Amino acid sequence: MESYEPERLSPVQLAAMRRSLTNGRGALTRRSLLRASGMGALALGGIATLGACGIPPAGRAEGAAAADDHSAKEKEVTFSNWTEYMDVSDDEKSRPTLEAFTKRTGIRVKYTEDINDNVEFFGKIKPQLAAGQNTGRDLICVTDWLAARIIRLGWAQKLDPSNLPHAFANVSAQFRTPDWDPGRAYSYPWTGIPTVIAYNAKATGGRKVDSVTQLLDDPKLKGRVSFLSEMRDTVGMTLLDQGRDPGKFTDTDFDGAIGRLQKAVDKKQIRRFTGNDYTADLSKGDIAACVGWAGDIIQLQADNPDIKFAIPAAGYITSSDNLLVPAQARHKTNAEKVIDYYYEPPVAAQLAAYINYVCPVDGVRDELAKIDESMASNTLILPDREMAAKSRSFRSLSTEEETAYEEKFAKLIGA
């Protein structure tokens, strides 16, 4: 494997990661808002590992060399995923879709919920990947920025399209061509995570809040607005509001978005920048409107009918969690069969009905309606064509850009 000079994460990058793990997207939850309950010191230990060991410099790698594939003789696959990210039976004793996969294919799935946050997990598998060794995992699920890094370092195996007919045909257009993996040569999305505008209709007096401009300028919302402490979400939504593309912005565009937010801070329009702890304040009405994550909103709506969401006309940011086959994985073909299985609409519908995040599979609506009509009509789970067209992704950043941008954002939010 090619040798690299280590590139250490800057203090600013480490601070941003700690912020994310403490109360940001790293602390997002699966269905029950408990996704990151197991992080704590272990997660911060992962950050320390990254900072100490360094990472290779940016620059697209060609992917891992094909490892010996033992799939034909060994009917098994090891799959690492987040907690609460797979359907479970009512008695919580089985995983129906995985059991159906094994029954159909004869491939036994060793499924482990050992991903509590991206940084900690990367710290766990990085030594083996860097040494060209098998991580003991055939399939992993990581957030887009980490998927991009693993692919860039050459630590993901290129997928065989002949083993992925359903995935290739059914991946939704909004997830088909991320800038870090055009055409999905190395990855497929497991789910999408939209950033939207949420508001408490009781706290707004029944008024709809549907734009970042309204959040930043409406005097009736002064002091009752929050934005997220995740740079990509808050700046991305502001860039869109200013008519800029988060997938193609310049340094000048970024500075313009920071300046726009700073004005709102200075006039005390923005109450605070938060992780997912905004949910309690929004539900109580202490925060009238905010930028928030769709998964949180679905949970809040189940208990509070006053919680509403809006998709700005300017668009919204969507990130994704993605399936990858690590370098030196022993059962690549079996892993590809798992990926393809979850792109069959009936299977994808069953999964979406359980996890309640955006389903990246086309053709699911009718299947999901058979399970739960309300879910099939919920655009936070199945975006309609109009909503999907407004979805944008925050572009990949070089190490230098990430350091500079996080430093400016940290100053803005007082971190």
Image (cartoon, rainbow, N blue to C red):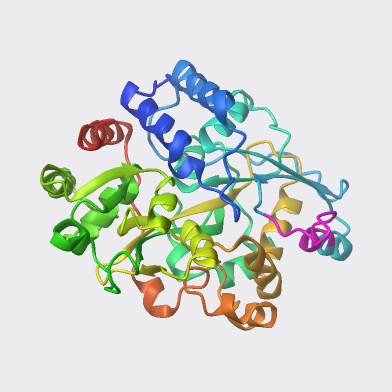
What secondary structure prevails in the magenta region?
loop
The residue lying toward the viewer, choosing from 273 and 239, is 273
Quarter location, residue 399: top left
Q: Residue at x 43, y 19 (%)?
A: 6
Q: Residue 191 location, x and y as percent?
A: 55, 59
The residue lying toward the viewer, choosing from 362 and 317, is 317
Query: Which quarter of the rendering shows the N terminus?
Result: top right
Q: Residue 320 location, x and y as percent?
A: 48, 54
With 239 as the anchor, is 118 left or right in this view? Answer: right
Q: Is residue 97 magenta?
A: yes
The residue lying toward the viewer, choosing from 223 and 31, is 223
With 384 as the anchor, is 131 left or right in this view? Answer: right
Residue 186 shows in this picture: no
Q: Is residue 66 above or below residue 204?
A: above
Residue 40 shows in this picture: yes
Query: Which quarter of the rendering shows the C terminus?
Result: top left
Q: Is residue 290 above or below residue 51?
A: below
Q: Is residue 24 above or below residue 188?
A: above
Q: Residue at x 68, y 64 (%)?
A: 342
Q: Residue 7 location, x and y as percent?
A: 39, 22
Q: Residue 107 location, x and y as percent?
A: 85, 54
Q: Which residues are magenta?
A: 86-99
